Structure formats: C-alpha cells, structure tokens
Image (spheres, helix red, strand yellow):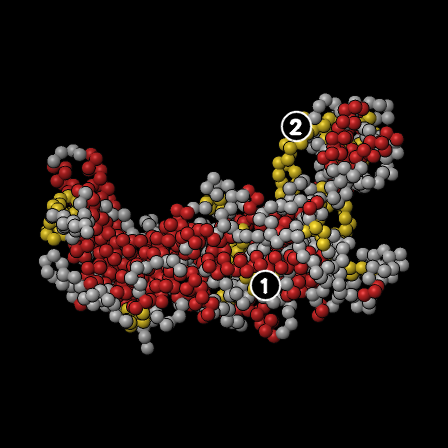
Amino acid sequence: MTDSRNISISANLTALPDRVSVDGLETKWGEEWETDQTYAFHDSRDRDAVYSIDTPPPTVSGSLHVGHVFSYTHTDIIARFKRMNGFDVFYPMGWDDNGLPTERRVQNYYGVRVDTSLKYDPDFVPPFEGTEGKKIQAKDQVPISRKNFIELCEKLTAQDEKLFEALWRKLGLSVDWKQTYHTIGQHPQRVAQKAFLRNLARGQAYQKEAPGLWDVTFQTAVAQAELESREYPGFYHKVAFHFEDGSPIYIETTRPELLPACVALIAHPDDERYQQYFGQFVYSPLFGVKVPVLAHPAAEKDKGAGIAMCCTFGDMTDVEWWRDLHLPTRSIIQRNGRIIMDMPDWITSEEGKRIFGEIEGKTTFSARKIIVDALRESGDLDGEPKPTQRMTNFYEKGDKPLEIVTSRQWYLENGGTNPELNAKLIERGKELNFHPDFMRVRYENWVHGLNGDWLISRQRFFGVPFPLWYPLDANGQPDYEHPLTPSEDILPIDPTSDVPEGYTEDQRDQPNGFTAEKDIMDTWATSSLTPQIVTHWAEPGEANEALFHATFPMDLRPQGQDIIRTWLFSSVDRAQLENNCLPWANAALSGWILDPDHKKMSKSKGNVVVPNEPIEKYGADAVRYWAACARLGLDATYDEGQMKIGRRLAIKLLNATKFALAIGREDENHHVADAASTVWNPEDVTEPLDRAAMAKMALVIREATLFLENYEHSKALEVIESYFWQFCDDYIELVKNRAYGTEDAHGNKPTEAAIKSARTALGMGLDAFARLLAPFLPYATEEVWSWMHAGEGSVHRAAWPKPLPYATAAFQVSPDLLANAGQALAALRGIKSKSKVSMKTPIKSVTLAVDPQVRESIKAALGDIAQAGRVIGDFSLENASTVIDRLQSEGPLPAVSDAVEQVSNAASSALDTVANAAAGLVGVATSAVTGNNAASAGNDSTGSAETVITVTASELGEPPAKKPKN
C-alpha cells in the first residue's frame, strides 16, 4: 500500500513541447473536458457530499461584458476548489431570457412591436434581422401579434444563449452543461406558477386596485426594488390658490400640469403659518375646484412654501396623504403618460373646461407649458419659475420619470406590511453567511425600509403568465374576487390559450363565460425561485425528490452587490414563504468593474469591454487571474496590466514544470525519455534547503486552504503566487545545479541522495503548485498535469493538496532558510549588477555579513548558494557583530551603524521565527503547520522573516566571452 504522504507521477515526457505556450489551450482542454464529462454532477444523494451553487442566470439581451467574466470567475474558483476537496459539485447554468430587457432587444433587433388586437400570422417575416445597434423608433416598428412577438423573443434568445455558452466555456467555467435551464422554459414556468398558486391559497399573494408606480415608456407597473433615484432638472412655480374672499395662499410646485388633479393643500400640523387655515377651503387657480386645507405630519415645513398641493398623483407622498386623509381620486394621467381625453366631472367652470380642453391628450411636458402660460396670463403665477434639481424616481431600465397611476395589480407578501414576516426575514439575514460580512447591513437596511408588499405583475408580453382566469357575469364584467385556478398537475398553463375546467373555448370573453389574466409575472418573480428551479422542487418522481433533498438548501448564492435588494432578498422571501428556511447558507457578493476613469462599466454608458477581446489577446487564464485578484465586495478596475502578469504566471508554470520533469531524463542530445514513472517520497528530501522549501509549501497550502474555505479567493491567490515566484526565482535557481548533478567549481559532485532530494522537492513543489493554481488557471494547470500524470485524469478531479507530505519532508527545518538563501543569492547577483557584468561572471571571493544565528542556517545551503552565484573561490560568512565592532573602531558612521543595527535586529527576529517554525514542523502531523501560523503572522504571507544580508568584500573574475554574432 502506498504511503499517503507519497506523490506518484506517471509522466508523459514526449508531450513536453520544445517551446511552451498558453495559446490554444482553451480549445484543446475544453474539448477534452466535454468528452470526459470532467465537471458532470454525479447525482450524489448524500447531502453532506454535495456542494450546490445557485448560479446567477445572466440576462440574455445582447452581449456580456468583462464585468460578467469578473464575477462568474469568482464563483468558478470556489466550485473548482470544492470539487478538488471531494465534493460532488452541483453547478448548473441558467439563462434569464424573459422580461423587459429581452423585449426591448427584440423590438430593436427585428423592428417590431406588440399590438394585442392583431391575430397570429404564421407566415410573418420581420422587417429587419439585426439593426447593428441602432434604435428603431416606435413609430417605425411594425405591429405584430403577441404570439408572433413571443416567437421572435424565443428565436433571438436561443441565438444569444449559444454565444453566451461559448464564451463561458472558453473562460473555463466548470459548469455541468447538462444542468441548464431557461427562466421562460417549461420547468421554470411550472415552478413559478405552482409557487404562486400556493402563495394565493395561503393568502400570501393578493390583488388590489391602487395607485402605484408606472413606467409610461414600457407601459407597465414597477416595483419598489426596481426604482432608481436620479437628479432631474425642473422649475419651482409659485402659484396662488384663493379663499372664498379672494385672498391668496401660495404653494410652490414643480408639476403645475397636475393642478386639475389637486384634491387638497397640506401643511405640517405644527406649522404656525397655516394652523389658522386648517379646515378651511380654497379654490384652485384656472379650474376653480374647491379643495380643503389639511394637516399631515409628512408635510415639510422647510420645503418650498411649507404648504403643498396634494394631487392624485404626483409622487408617493401624494399617495400617503390621499390614503391617510381619505381624499377623493382625481386622476388625469393615462398609462401612456398623456393627459386623459375625457373632461373630468369635477371641473365645472367654463374657463376650467376651456383650459383643460387645451391639454387633453398632451404629454405632461406639453401640458405643463400650457398651464404655466395660462397661470402667467391669469396672474396666478407669482414671479418667474426658478430652476431646480430634484431627485426623481425612474424605472431602473427607463429614461423617463415614473408616473403614478391607479391599476389592478398582483402583490406578494415580503414583510412590507406584515411585521411578523419582516422580523423573520431580518432573522434569516442574520443566519446567512455574507461574504464579505459588511454586505449584511445592505440587506437589513432594505428589509427595515420596506413600505409595501412586492408588486409582481407586469403589463408586458414575454414572461411567465399568471395561471388564472376570471368568471364573467351576465354583462361580461370579470369577477376579480373569485379567480379560476388550474390544478397543479397540469402546469404550466397559458390562460390566453388554455381553458379553465368546466368551460369551453367558445366561452372566452363572452358574458357568463371567462376571461384570461393577461398580466405576466415580473422577471424577478421567476428568478427569485432559481434555488427551487435548479433543485427540482415540487417536481414529481423519485429522482427529482432525491435531487432536491441532496441540493437544497443550497450552499452558495454568488451575485452582484447591486441586486441584494432584488434577487437576493426576493429569493430569501420566496424560500421563507414556501420552505420556511434560507435558500442557501452563503452569499458571495462581487463588486463592480470600473473603467480606467474609475466609472462603473455599463452598456448604457458605452464604456464596456467585450470579454472576447482580452481572452483572445491574453488567454482565458490571464483574464481569470485579473478577476481573481479582486476581493469580494470591492470594485475593481479593468486592468490589462494584470492580465499580462497572469499570462506570465501561466507560462512560468509551464516552463518550471517542464524543467523539473526533464531533469535527469535527457540524453546527450537533450532528448527526454518517452515516459517515466516516479514516486516522490517526502523522506527522500534530506537537504536543508529542500526541506525549507517543503516547510514553506506546507504553510502555503494551509493558508490558501483557509482563505478559500472562507471565500477569500484573492488572498489565497496572493499567498500561492507569492511563493510560486519565490520557488521559481530563488529555489529552482539555487538547486538546479545539484538537481542536474553538476560538479561545483572545485570538482565536487553532489551525492545521489542530495540529487534525489532536490529532484523530489522540485517535483513535489510543482505538483502542489499545479493543484493550488488549478482553480485560478485551469488551462495551464491541466496542461502541466497531463505531463506529470499522464492517463490519470484531470487535475480538476485530483485531490486538493494537503500539508502533511510537505510537513513530513520539512522535518525540523524552518522555511526561513529558503528566504535567507534567496537573499544571499540576491546579494551575489547585486555584486554583478553593480559592476554591470553578466550574471554568468564568476566571483573569485566574497564575504557576506549575517547574524550569527542566521549564519549557521545559511551554512547548510552554502554549496547551493555558491553554485547558483558562480562563486569559484573563497566564500566566507562574517558575523554581523564583528562588522559592528570593526565599524565602531574605525570611527562614528551613524548611517552605516544604523544599517548594521537593522541587520542585527532583523536577524534576531528571524531567529525567533526559525525556532518557532522548526518546533511547529517537527514530525509529520498536519497540526505542525497550524503551529507555525503564529510565527508567520507578522511577516509575509507564508512566514519568512525579514533578514538583511550584506556584502562586506568581494572580487569578481573575468566575465565570460561574448559569443560572436553570425
């Protein structure tokens, strides 16, 4: 039986290229992963063996940008890490292909719009097939039936999804592509409709007719979570209302076009200026409508004149006043944003009727101009309008301010009106592990600030329909209080084409018949159920039940920080209502991507970068490296400089691994053997420098593992990468001569044990790096793994490295030896750099000043240091204390003395670290690594102490002769 501490390889050395390259690895390994089903979920039924991810379904409405690559890479790193730690990773991918973004794209792409009065045309051909990003005006769009429009939506999203999948595959997402879904697909529709019907039966879903936010461009209701507050230019108009005796009272308003909709004047009850008028009546200018002067605590004494007109409706404050004070409804704005065409019955004066006739059918902007001109002419406008900037509510995808119209809508409880549910949702937020934790407050602030339930109905076309019909009375009027519902076993249904039980199609829209609910669900109403959709909640069959119990509640929800209030909160709400639990244990929240000017990237700003470009230029691993460098929750700048570093890292891994595998297997013509099987036994690591390298590797594995377990991928990468470069730049350079068995300058050849020690440490180190970097650089690591472990499967199915083999190999040696030896080598290189000669120039003699304690440590690696630095003569180490004594005897040299004191102090500190590390790594127990964490805390990420090594004397030999140019 092979010792678990050993690392076996079966190298395919003929696969080693003459010159390494990362180009083409995406195609090579992407095809291999697909063929081998490397990332397939194995349908484990043991919940403890499964790690399930609620992957964000990207909106399929055009193209992705690097911001998507950024956040999805973060998720993939965790998925790969968990898979290598033995979990059966459930990592599906969805497409959010319904809703307004898709509709808008289809309208522009094909040049069409919906007209619900038109019948379906099976032979319809759209006027355009892609308009190259140009926006087609509504008046130029061809009207088509709802069914024709939905078919075009389905066609275009299918095309977009293929492009999205190709990009995700090239990026290297380890998704199980058999586990995909579409939010408009049959299965998600069934889940959404089933959940709604159950909410309805429990009284958690309800409908009511009430004033609500309305987008006049998209002609649909808008929920609180979809609001975006923006600065909007306007004017304050000081307008006179009049008492019965003709005396004026002035209000200031930015919306004089709403004067016909005024139902009261409102002031704060404590405002002494207006207390005498409460309960009296005034008449509106131009229209002469009698309205009361009332008090309400929401009135702002220091805003404008301190008294405001309440109209139905200008903003949500109007709605609050209207509801609290039981005011009448006098709406004048239609759903299209224009003034109503019918003369209101509350306007009775001839002058009022004349003026209202002038604004009938006008936009609010045009109506405002007409009203202001009329006020100026009547003398009711005091002075000229004053410009102002005010915060106005917009739909997040709209470009016009929202209006408030009265309509019948469906709502779902979310804690906005139910204090008990609100408290429960706050409690769920405390149970959820937020990464980073400071994001929790955003969730809590949102839940605390809710002022109404979730409006889930939309007056659009491409979405999940409500599974409802309404009975019609003898006059053909719908009975909204008693909707007709289908049984769950026939879901999903479309009420506009399906018929309720007990009715026939010819009774549709006929007296005593039925009519369909024509609204669709908000896209978030479907997306909020992704945990239930992907885990096959409430689906019949033993396999579906087993999948649900093995994957739900899920382990991870990754998403952007900007949709905590929408997707994250709504998902918690749905799981609480349906499952009485959290939908997942962890939420990982990515920040935004900023352009070079530190502005958020967005399609609307035109500053996005298409991800295909940097992937083609630098490779997928390089782009992933850039993404991985960013911490969760923090914004990051698009930086191609980091991508270049990532590409260099991948190439260096290929070169270093090729070097280590080829050592000792080359013939005189530098050809390597066809194959080689090797067992790297930690006990074969016998040389102090090799043991130091293994000691540090044990620490790196420990720290990287802890960081990744805590979803801190950027810190894990920093730890791994830092040591990788030290391993390549210092360790490999220090031991390569010994690994080759090269004689030193005095003709001494290393022993077989010393050679084997170096080769074993090199192999064990690079084997560990291949696995440690696999979540970050999947292509380069798969390539080197195929060289080291031919025929043994993917590195992404290999075990995550454990500290034990490396702690065993480190036996009683501190990792600081490697750092000290590296500094000594740097000092030797510095001699040559200062003299501006080649690094191949031999050093005849050299003396280094080090602390006595560090001196003993370095002496153990002096042979490797001498060969790496090409020291051919005397190589001596001098105690730092001796240097101090000599300098002091030669006179006061404060600057030098300070520097030497720094050397001494640093060396003393290093001694403590060496002692602690050595004690922590004695034996072979994994706990040895844990014991060394304290020693590493104050230094670099893996425990090396700061030690200053100085050159006190040196003599260079002759530089090597330059080769003549051909």
- Residue shown at 20% from the left, 34% from the top: 894
- Kindly state the secondary structure of the residue where label 1 is placed: strand
Q: Amino acid at mark 2?
A: Pro
- Residue shown at 38% from the left, 64% from the top: 782
Vertical arrangement, residue 40 with respect to residue 129, above or below? below
The disc at residue 463 is: none
Q: Could you say which is closer to the camera, residue 345 or residue 941?
A: 345
Q: Is residue 762 left or right of residue 132?
A: left
Is there any visible trace of residue 346 in the rendered image?
yes
Is there any visible trace of residue 7 in the rendered image?
no
- Residue shown at 47% from the left, 62% from the top: 174
Q: Amino acid at mark 1?
A: Tyr
Quadrant of the image occupied by residue 195: bottom right
- Kindly state the secondary structure of the residue where label 2 is placed: strand
Q: Could you say which is closer to the camera, residue 887 or residue 726?
A: 726
Q: Is residue 884 left or right of residue 200?
A: left
Q: Could you say which is closer to the camera, residue 897 or residue 233?
A: 233
* Residue 222 percent coordinates (x, y): 68, 48
CA gap, disc 1 and disc 2: 51 Å
The disc at residue 387 is: 2
* Residue 391 percent coordinates (x, y): 64, 36
Mark 2 Cα-neighbour bin, 10 Å: few <14, some 14–19, many ≥20: few
Mark 1 Cα-neighbour bin, 10 Å: few <14, some 14–19, many ≥20: many
Could you tell me which quadrant the N terminus lies in? bottom left
* Residue 722 percent coordinates (x, y): 34, 52
Vertical arrangement, residue 613 with respect to residue 793, above or below? above
In the picture of the structure, the residue carrying the numbered disc 1 is 181
